[in-house]
Amino acid sequence: MSFDVKCYVTWNEGLQRRGVISVVDCVPGELVEVADVDTLAYTVRGIVGKVFTGLESSSVTFDSNEPIGSTHMIYRYHVNITGDKYIGVRAVVYGKTLVRLLFTVPSGVGVELGFKPEQYTAEKELEAGGPPREITVAPGQVYVDYPVVYSISGLPQVDVSKWMLSIEGEVDKPLKLSLLDLYEMGLDEIIVDFHCVTGWSVRGLVFTGVKLKKILEASKIKPSAKWIYVESLDGYTTVLPIEEAFDEKALIALEMNRKPLSIHHGYPARLLIPRLYGWKSAKWVYKLHLMSKYRDGYWESLGYHPRGRVDLEERFKKA
Ligand SMILES: Nc1nc2c(c(=O)[nH]1)N[C@H]1C(S)=C(S)[C@@H](COP(=O)(O)O)O[C@H]1N2
Ligand SMILES: [Mo]
């Protein structure tokens, strides 16, 4: 295996709760063609040998694969360490080309990198596509009747009498809003299509909630605020560029199809950013942390895009 590979090292609290201590996210420096699960296993084994010192002769076994939209596939493998310990592998394939290889390193597995990791710059990813605009196309999606329910770790316990949405970080006026405070700010209704990055979409969902823009204006965000790191009660996190939150249709949603959100869909409140893929629309949200610097949320640390615009098909990081 002679080709070059550059790697970043990242981590996320939500992943750490699930036993993953860090993620080594690698991008091949040249075109790597993928034919099938076995030849890809061989390629993965070669890259493992380059990335981790001392793992040159470990075995790699296939786990599962799944399509992401109509253009990408994720292949999962295990790099067997000792006994039941393994490093997880997620290979992101675009058409027939390997575009990213992510290693999830569990706690208790000491690894040594055979190189110096690069510094990831999310800002580079935002240059594509020009100014934000309404979605007119959702390439590579298929339509279903009702949104699939996702949660990284089951349904959280919610006590609405104690629940607050906190807005903090790069703001002049930090806020803590109760559900009643949110209703009193005045609700708007939007009708939008919802798109999950894995490839399903739902047409014409009605969401009612407080415009995110209104909440950010009330908290007097500083000019240094460039990103919003979003935290949820189930340990889920995500991140979005500040401009996306100023979209007229971006909401802290309290109702779906004119009924309070069900616990499955994020009661008491969820983010809803219709022009971004669904993973940015965090359910059971309790904190918006305004930041000057980017950091990965849960899916972003597994290679998903810092912005995730549907019309541009920003499914995975490209840098
Ligand atoms: N807190 C939390 N929010 C989340 C998720 C999650 O696992 N936890 N999954 C995301 C993903 S990947 C999608 S597509 C949407 C799905 O929304 P739904 O479960 O209401 O259909 O929720 C997003 N928000
Ligand atoms: Mo999703």
Image: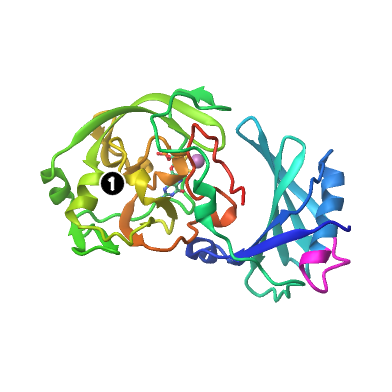
Residue 7 picture quarter: bottom right
What predominant SS class does the magenta segment belong to?
A: loop
Count of numbered labels shown in the rendering: 1
Q: Position of residue 199 (x, y in %)?
A: 56, 32
Secondary structure beneath label 1: loop
Residue 263 picture quarter: top left
Work out which residue is located at the far left of the displayed protein and give it: 184
Would you say 229 lies left or right of 11 here?
A: left
Residue at 76% across / 41% down in the picture? 97
Magenta-drawn stretch contains 54: yes
Q: Position of residue 311 (x, y in %)?
A: 49, 31
Residue at 25% across / 63% down in the picture? 171
Quadrant of the frame with the N terminus = bottom right
Q: Position of residue 272 (x, y in %)?
A: 34, 40
| Neighbour tally class for label 1: few under 14, some 14-19, many 20 plus, Cα within 10 Å | many
Q: Position of residue 252 (x, y in %)?
A: 27, 44
Residue at 83% across / 74% down in the picture? 54
The answer to which of 318 and 190 lies nearer the viewer is 318
Residue at 74% across / 71% down in the picture? 115
Question: Is residue 163 depicted above or below 267 in this figure?
Answer: below
The answer to which of 247 and 81 lies nearer the viewer is 247
The answer to which of 88 and 130 lies nearer the viewer is 130
What is the three-letter code of the residue carrying label 1?
Answer: Ala
Residues in magenta?
Answer: 49-59
Would you say 250 lies left or right of 116 here?
A: left
Residue 236 picture quarter: bottom left
Q: Which residue is mark 1?
A: 269
